[in-house]
Amino acid sequence: MSGHLNAYSGVVNQRGEITRARLMDAAIDLTVRFGVNGWTLRNVGREAGQRNNSVCQHHFGTKEALLRGAVDEVLAAADEDFVEGPDVVQKLSRFFGQLLAADDYSDLLASHPKVVEEIGTKGSPGWRAWVLEVLEEAFVEPAQVTS
């Protein structure tokens, strides 16, 4: 029956979302530790505790799509004034720093709608510094920001 959802399919969808989130977290962690080009999709699956060697390909297809998903999640959290501790701020700053340092992947940030909305194109002066500044400000509690 098309369009019919049963209780099992709801559980599968929920598990899929949890798996996707774990994969994105693992990709962020590996990027921070080894740089963008220092890991493979298989490494991400293992880091996320998955036994299926093709789990990243199933959920994202490519490394770029996985990184794009992670960037979307982090910037969406920043839009919602998501606040975490300083260790998370540092990790996410390093994640974006690694993306910016990798010429193959810096466009993931440069072409992101939030970045384009704020600064225009990647050719704008200081766009890399702006991305890191916005990230750091978005993940710091207002009381911690000094004028």
Image: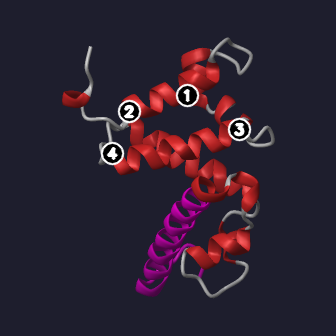
Q: What is the spatial separation of the Cα atoms under label 1 and label 2, in whole angstroms?
A: 11 Å
Q: What is the spatial separation of the Cα atoms under label 3 and label 1, in whole angstroms?
A: 12 Å
Give the x, y percent position of residue 80: 34, 38
User: Label 3: how many residues lie within 10 Å, few (<14), some (14-19) or many (20+)?
Assistant: some
* Left or right side of 5 for 46: right
What is the three-letter code of the residue carrying label 4? Answer: Pro
Q: Which mark is residue 2?
A: none
Q: What is the spatial separation of the Cα atoms under label 3 and label 2, in whole angstroms?
A: 21 Å
- Ranked by sequence position, the earlier of labels 3 and 2 is 3
Q: Which residues are magenta?
A: 1-30
Q: Is residue 2 visible?
A: no
Of labels 4 and 1, the one closer to you? 4
- Ranked by sequence position, the earlier of labels 3 and 1 is 3
* Left or right side of 48 for 57: right
Magenta stretch contains residue 7? yes
Please give the residue where the numbered disc 2 appears in the rendered image: 138
User: Label 1: how many residues lie within 10 Å, few (<14), some (14-19) or many (20+)?
Assistant: many
Please give the residue where the numbered disc 4 appears in the rendered image: 86
- Ranked by sequence position, the earlier of labels 3 and 4 is 4
Residue at 27 percent across and 25 percent down: it is 145
Looking at the rendered image, the quarter that the C terminus falls into is: top left
* Left or right side of 74 for 95: right
What is the three-letter code of the residue carrying label 1? Answer: Val
Q: Label 1 near label 4: C-beta < 8 Å?
A: no
What is the three-letter code of the residue carrying label 3? Answer: Ala
Q: Label 2 near label 3: C-beta < 8 Å?
A: no
Give the x, y percent position of residue 146: 25, 20
- The one nearer the camera, 147 or 79, is 147
